[in-house]
């Protein structure tokens, strides 16, 4: 069943299927969410969103979300887009949280990562940096590919909606 999802402040809106993760909905619609997200691996908090409406339509927070977000943030309907799944039909409104805001609200995660990285041997540091570079290149390629696809999907949706409304108006005129 369909879910209408809106990303604020960009205003990107679209319809996605129930069972879709928020990060996938954002990617499909071209919303600016989760740049650098590790896609559900529990290694970052770069896809934090605040649910302004429709929180009851999402899956409950899991252990990874509970480890990255404080109890106060969870109570204020903050979620990780890569872990929150649409489970009900209706309308959902999300506010995209800038990464710097997420860092300020949960800085212990990044301090721990910095500390862990500093304790790695040189070879492991280089290996980790190469992995991060590969992820960055992959994300850049995905963004370059997805933007035209999202534009095409939006254009196709508008075109089909116009065709449907035209067909309905013709049916109404016949009656």
Image: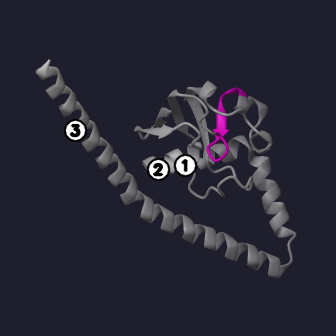
Q: Residue lying furthest bottom in this view?
A: 123
Q: Write down the residue under mark 3.
A: 163
Looking at the rendered image, the disc whose residue lies closer to the viewer, 3 or 2, is 3
Which residue is more in the foreground, 75 or 118? 75
Please tell me in which quadrant of the rendered image residue 133 appears. Answer: bottom right
Q: Could you say where residue 145 lies in the image, as x and y percent from the top left?
A: 43, 64
SS at mark 3?
helix
Q: Could you say where residue 86 lies in the image, as x and y percent from the top left?
A: 59, 36
- Tell me: 146 left or right of 165: right
Cα–Cα gap, marks 3 and 2: 22 Å
Q: Alpha-carbon neighbours of circle 3 within 10 Å: few (<14), some, or many (≥20)?
A: few
Q: Alpha-carbon neighbours of circle 1 within 10 Å: few (<14), some, or many (≥20)?
A: some
As for residue 49 lying within the magenta part, the answer is no
Q: Write down the residue under mark 1.
A: 24
- Could you tell me if the residues under marks 2 and 1 are in contact, i.e. CB atoms within 8 Å? yes
- Tell me: 54 left or right of 13: right
Q: Could you say where residue 15 lies in the image, as x and y percent from the top left?
A: 43, 37
For the stretch drawn in magenta, the main secondary structure is loop
The stretch in magenta equals 75-84
Q: Write down the residue under mark 2.
A: 28
Cα–Cα gap, marks 2 and 1: 6 Å
Q: Could you say where residue 93 lies in the image, as x and y percent from the top left?
A: 51, 31
- The answer to whether 56 is drawn above or below residue 114 in the figure is above
């Amino acid at each position: 069943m369909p879910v209408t999802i809106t990303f604020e402040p960009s205003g990107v809106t679209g319809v996605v299927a129930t069972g879709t993760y928020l990060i996938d909905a954002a990617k499909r619609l071209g919303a600016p969410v989760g740049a650098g997200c590790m896609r559900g691996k529990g290694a970052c908090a770069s896809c934090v969103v605040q649910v302004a409406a429709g929180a009851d339509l999402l899956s409950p927070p899991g252990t990874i979300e509970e480890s990255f977000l404080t109890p106060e943030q969870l109570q204020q309907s903050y979620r990780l887009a890569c872990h929150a799944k649409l489970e009900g039909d209706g309308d959902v409104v999300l506010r995209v949280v800038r990464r710097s805001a997420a860092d300020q609200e949960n800085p212990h995660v990044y301090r721990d990562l910095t500390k862990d990285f500093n304790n790695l041997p040189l070879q492991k540091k280089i290996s980790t940096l190469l992995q991060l570079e590969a992820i960055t290149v992959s994300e850049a390629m995905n963004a370059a590919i997805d933007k035209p696809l999202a534009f095409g999907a939006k254009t196709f949706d508008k075109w089909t909606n116009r065709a449907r409304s035209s067909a309905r108006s013709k049916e109404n005129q016949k009656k």
